[in-house]
Image: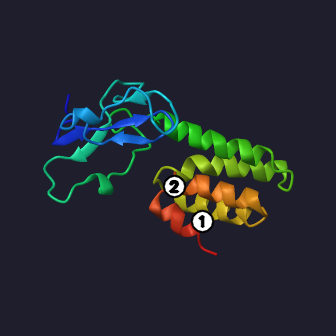
Amino acid sequence: MYVGNGYDVAQICKNGHLITACAITEPEYLKNFCPKCGEQTLLKCEFCKYPIQGINLYHESSSLNDYTIPLYCHNCGKPYPWTELQLCAVKKIIDQLNELELSERKEFITALDDIVRDTPNTKPAAYKIREILGKIRGDAQTVIRELIVELITGTAAKIILQR
């Protein structure tokens, strides 16, 4: 059940907590449910059933500390459940912000989808989000920033987190 090209398989809960990035080589760490949140764990993409890519078995410096939880399946391109849940959480908060115009809330939500993927639209979307975030005050801005940072690409993070 190796992913191929020398990668092990990762096990991650539906909320995005890493159980192990070495499910094949170290099966003793496998769990049916997450010890952090109690959610069911996954070894495969729910859409295409392809194993979630774990650590590189042939790269000498590869370790669990270097492992980054993927947002999308590398086989079919669909978002993993934790990606969808995180995006949904940010969208719920944005929908409740009365300090933003309806059009700004819609622009923010549309831009979210572009900052989690590294595409030509990432930079313009990141600038739009930074602009709108500047209009949000207090705890809401902090919470939104924290949720977004876990999802965004490096390019978007640099733009959005500039002050």
Give the x, y percent position of residue 16.
47, 40
Q: Is residue 4 above or below residue 55?
A: above
Q: Is residue 54 above or below residue 141?
A: above
66 on left or right of 156? left
Q: Residue at the location (54% across, 53% down)?
A: 115
* Distance CA(mark 2)–CA(mark 1): 9 Å
Give the x, y percent position of residue 96.
80, 45
Residue behind mark 1: 160
First reached walking from the N terminus: tag 2 or tag 1: 2
Residue behind mark 2: 152
119 on left or right of 125? left
Q: Amino acid at mark 1?
A: Ile
Q: Residue at the location (42% across, 24% down)?
A: 47
Give the x, y percent position of residue 130.
66, 64
Q: Amino acid at mark 2?
A: Ile
Q: Secondary structure at mark 1?
A: helix
